Image (cartoon, coloured by chain):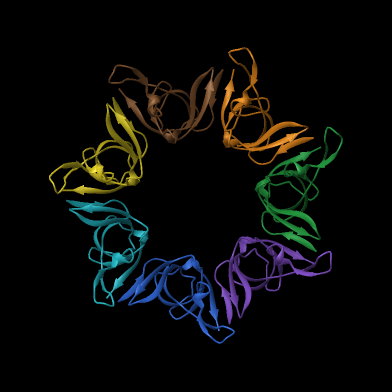
Chain colours: A green, B purple, C blue, D cyan, E yellow, F brown, G orange
Amino acid sequence: MKVKPLGERLLIKPIIEEKKTAGGIVLPDAAKEKPMKAEIVEVGKLPEDCTLKVGDKVIYNKYSGTELKIDDEDYIIIDVNDILAKIEE
Amino acid sequence: MKVKPLGERLLIKPIIEEKKTAGGIVLPDAAKEKPMKAEIVEVGKLPEDCTLKVGDKVIYNKYSGTELKIDDEDYIIIDVNDILAKIEE
Amino acid sequence: MKVKPLGERLLIKPIIEEKKTAGGIVLPDAAKEKPMKAEIVEVGKLPEDCTLKVGDKVIYNKYSGTELKIDDEDYIIIDVNDILAKIEE
Amino acid sequence: MKVKPLGERLLIKPIIEEKKTAGGIVLPDAAKEKPMKAEIVEVGKLPEDCTLKVGDKVIYNKYSGTELKIDDEDYIIIDVNDILAKIEE
Amino acid sequence: MKVKPLGERLLIKPIIEEKKTAGGIVLPDAAKEKPMKAEIVEVGKLPEDCTLKVGDKVIYNKYSGTELKIDDEDYIIIDVNDILAKIEE
Amino acid sequence: MKVKPLGERLLIKPIIEEKKTAGGIVLPDAAKEKPMKAEIVEVGKLPEDCTLKVGDKVIYNKYSGTELKIDDEDYIIIDVNDILAKIEE
Amino acid sequence: MKVKPLGERLLIKPIIEEKKTAGGIVLPDAAKEKPMKAEIVEVGKLPEDCTLKVGDKVIYNKYSGTELKIDDEDYIIIDVNDILAKIEE
């Protein structure tokens, strides 16, 4: 199933980071707080001056967007204005 | 009875997906969460750059739209801006 | 008494549908939920591209409009934007 | 004392209708619900395409406007957009 | 101390009216309800088509404006749009 | 430390006035209510038709602006639209 | 990891100031109240008439912006309109 966002929206996949506790136990980041990093999976019709593209890693506003499951994995459809920053590694 | 949406609205029919539990029991998706997939049944006067048409399957914002019953079946009249994505299979 | 809506408003008369229970008892629809069908009784000054006219049956947003009694019957004065769809039989 | 509304406002006087109960007792309408009929007493500077004038009877949005007493009688100063319909008898 | 309102604001002085109870006791109006009459004391930069001037008596929206004390007397700084009507005696 | 407001904002210093009680005890005004007078300390980029300048005394909307401490003294950064009046002595 | 803000946003790093209590104990400012000073770390696409740049120290609206951790340090992504003032030392 392929999901194509409409309008100025993107489909993003949250990135869950693992963290080790002091005692060495690995905890997914979500155990502490909602993740804010995601990878762009599909884009709708973005504004002309927007350079975001599939594969970019971004910081998004965690209280925005609509969560949905595709093939049992979590995705978010989000407005381009709720993408706060691009991660350049 | 035929219902023709007015303005930039669509008439959609939610798609209820069945799910099997670990023990093999079939549960409609609605037993867990509100469905977000629907098929377009009728369209009003959509914006010119909108390519949605009757028969398209879409993801919609589940907190939007107005539920109504037609011949004992559930439908939703929803604004085109609350259609988040198109499902391309 | 004749009531002429002002601006982009309409005067509509809700349609109460009767339903039979399993045991054959006739229940007005309102016993279950607020009706959403109505017939247009008077129109104000509607937008030029609006084709709604007196006698049309419509679906309206049940949380909108102002209820009033005329000669002991229930009517609603409602904005044209809260008429969601036209019923074409 | 004469009160001249400013801007697109009107001064209206609510019309209280008497009702007889089954037993013949006369009840003012207000004993049951807030009145919604009023007569226009003064007009401010109404929009050019507005034909409302002093003496017209109207239906108004009962949750709008500002109540005031003039010489111990109740009046309402209300925006022209909250006049829903004109009563033509 | 002279207070000159900025922008489309006015400085007004509420008018407290005395009322006699049945027993002849004089009660200021404020003992019953907030006053709504005021006299204009200073004006800011009012819109060109506004004819309000210092000394005019007006009806104002009692839930608007900012109360302040000048030399121990009560005044209100209020937006011109919250002046509902002019009192012409 | 010098704080330069950005945009249509001003830095103001609230003026606390002393009051004597009947018994002659001096009470700062703040013991009774929030002060509303202030002196302008710095200005940002005010609109062209705004004549406010450093040193002016003003009445401000006491529920607006952001309080901050500079060198242990209280200041407020406030939007020019929340300055209600100028005090001309 | 480098985070590049999108649109009219900035990445800022809050400045925590130490304070000594009367008894000489050093307390970080955050023990008393949320800090409001920050240094600009990265800028997005700011408006043309905005002179803010990386390294500037600013006062920001403490209830605005989105907190995030980068390499275990606290940062805020904030809209340029929520930067209230520039600190010029």
Q: Residue at x 37, y 67 (%)?
A: C6
Q: Residue at x 53, y 20 (%)?
A: F70
C22 or G56, which is in the foreground? C22
Whether C87 is drawn above or below G25: the answer is below
F85 or G43, which is in the foreground? F85
Percent x, y of residue C44: 39, 70
Whether A22 is drawn above or below C85: the answer is above
Q: For residue E7, which quarter of the picture? A: top left
The image quadrant where one finds the C terminus of chain D is: bottom left
Is C89 positioned to the left or the right of D26 in the image? right
Q: Residue at x 53, y 26 (%)?
A: F68
Percent x, y of residue C82: 49, 67
Query: So how many labels did they put on this image?
Result: 0
Percent x, y of residue F58: 38, 27
Q: For residue A8, which quarter of the picture? A: bottom right
Whether A75 is drawn above or below F6: the answer is below
Extreme bottom residue here? C24
Extreme left residue here? E24
Q: Residue at x 51, y 81 (%)?
A: C27
Q: For residue D22, which quarter of the picture? A: bottom left
F55 or F19, which is in the foreground? F19
D82 or B6, which is in the foreground? D82
Is F3 positioned to the left or the right of E39 in the image? right
Percent x, y of residue A85: 71, 41
